[in-house]
Image (cartoon, rainbow, N blue to C red):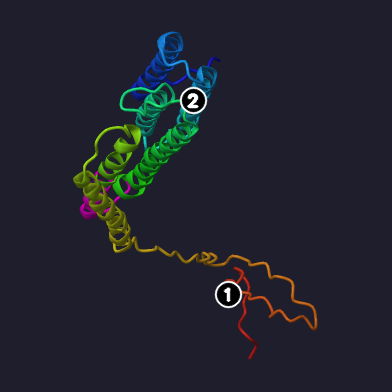
């Protein structure tokens, strides 16, 4: 008897094609920059590109392993997040658009790697918050207030993450003072907003616990009940309970009247 395998879902298929396309694009761009790009520390850049692609593939495999369950959207969302991180990493490694021009300075390399790790932490943390809040406060919400506040919280979290991550991805752009003020304001609002669904969830109506008491059925009338053995002398246990038996009817044809 042959087992029939479940067909691959549409989101899994989209994530698979997106992953393969990202790997091919990273390989082509790496080869292009090796030929015509900046030749400073080109061997280190090539090895770091291979490491970046390997980490991307491992992240996709791990996300695919934990994507089963109620969060069907997690796999495509995590794949898109990983693709963005690969693009930012390639910009940092190969001195792309709006990146520092002095690639020979070791301090520039250290600062670029720090900014890339900062972007990775921000996006993956936002993805983790989305996974937790989407499951416990949106999908499993019992009231409409919990669902609405959770969705608003997730929107604020992603807006804050994007405002903080874009300057780190493109450090050479002229980011004015109002951008950083907006980043501080959205960070404060997002942190406070993450607490509101938890409080609303705590005040949701709880299910009444149903307790059932097990009762032993009464023996039928006229049934003979086997008595349990008595406890030995000196035992701390109380004697077993023996229910009374129903009186037996008189045998037919026998006169039980006492003599005069």
Mark linked to residue 200? none
Identify which residue, 130 or 245, lies in the foreground.
130
- Taking the magenta stretch, the answer to whether it contains residue 161 is no
**Picture layout, residue 180 above or below residue 246:** above
- Taking the magenta stretch, the answer to whether it contains residue 143 is yes
Q: Where does label 2 land, which residue? A: 52
Please identify the quarter of the rendering in which residue 67 is found.
top left
Nearer to us of marks 2 and 1 is 2
Q: Is residue 73 visible?
A: no
State the image coordinates of residue 177 (x, y, percent, origin top left).
Answer: 21, 46
State the image coordinates of residue 166 (x, y, percent, origin top left).
Answer: 30, 36
Is residue 67 found left or right of 199 in the rendered image? right
Identify which residue, 63 or 97, lies in the foreground.
97
**Picture layout, residue 105 above or below residue 180:** above
Is residue 48 found left or right of 73 in the rendered image? right
State the image coordinates of residue 174 (x, y, percent, origin top left).
Answer: 24, 36
Please identify the quarter of the rendering in which residue 259 is found.
bottom right
User: How many marks overall?
Assistant: 2
- Estimate how packed mark 1 is, as few (under 14), some (14 to 19) or many (20 or more) residues with alpha carbons within 10 Å: few
Task: Farthest residue to the right: give it.
Answer: 233
Q: Where does label 1 land, which residue? A: 247
Q: Residue at x 69, y 79 (%)?
A: 239
Q: Residue at x 33, y 44 (%)?
A: 134
Which SS type dominates the magenta stretch? helix
- Estimate how packed mark 2 is, as few (under 14), some (14 to 19) or many (20 or more) residues with alpha carbons within 10 Å: some
Is residue 60 found left or right of 83 in the rendered image? right
| The magenta segment | 140-155
**Picture layout, residue 81 above or below residue 19:** below
State the image coordinates of residue 2 (x, y, percent, origin top left).
Answer: 54, 15
């Amino acid at each position: 008897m042959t087992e029939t395998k479940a067909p691959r879902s549409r989101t899994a298929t989209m994530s698979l094609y997106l992953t393969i396309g990202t790997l091919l694009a990273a390989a082509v761009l790496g080869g292009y920059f090796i030929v015509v790009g900046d030749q400073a520390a080109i061997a280190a850049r090539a090895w770091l590109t291979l490491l970046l692609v390997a980490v991307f593939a491992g992240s996709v495999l791990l996300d695919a392993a934990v994507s089963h369950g109620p969060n069907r959207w997690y796999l495509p969302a995590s794949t898109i997040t990983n693709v963005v991180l690969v693009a930012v990493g390639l910009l940092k490694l190969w001195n792309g658009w709006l990146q520092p021009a002095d690639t020979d300075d070791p301090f520039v390399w250290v600062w670029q790697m720090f900014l890339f790790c900062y972007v990775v932490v921000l996006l993956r943390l936002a993805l983790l918050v989305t996974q937790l809040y989407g499951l416990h406060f949106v999908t499993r919400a019992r009231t409409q207030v919990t669902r609405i506040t959770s969705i608003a919280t997730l929107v604020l979290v992603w807006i804050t993450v994007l405002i903080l991550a874009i300057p780190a991805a493109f450090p050479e752009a002229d980011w004015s003072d109002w951008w950083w003020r907006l980043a501080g304001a959205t960070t404060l609002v997002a942190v406070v907003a993450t607490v509101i669904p938890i409080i609303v969830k705590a005040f949701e109506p709880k299910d009444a616990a149903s307790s059932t008491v097990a009762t032993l059925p009464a023996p039928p009338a006229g049934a003979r009940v086997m008595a349990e053995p008595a406890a030995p002398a000196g035992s701390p246990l109380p004697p077993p309970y023996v229910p009374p038996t129903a009186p037996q009817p008189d045998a037919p044809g026998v006169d039980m009247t006492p003599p005069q």
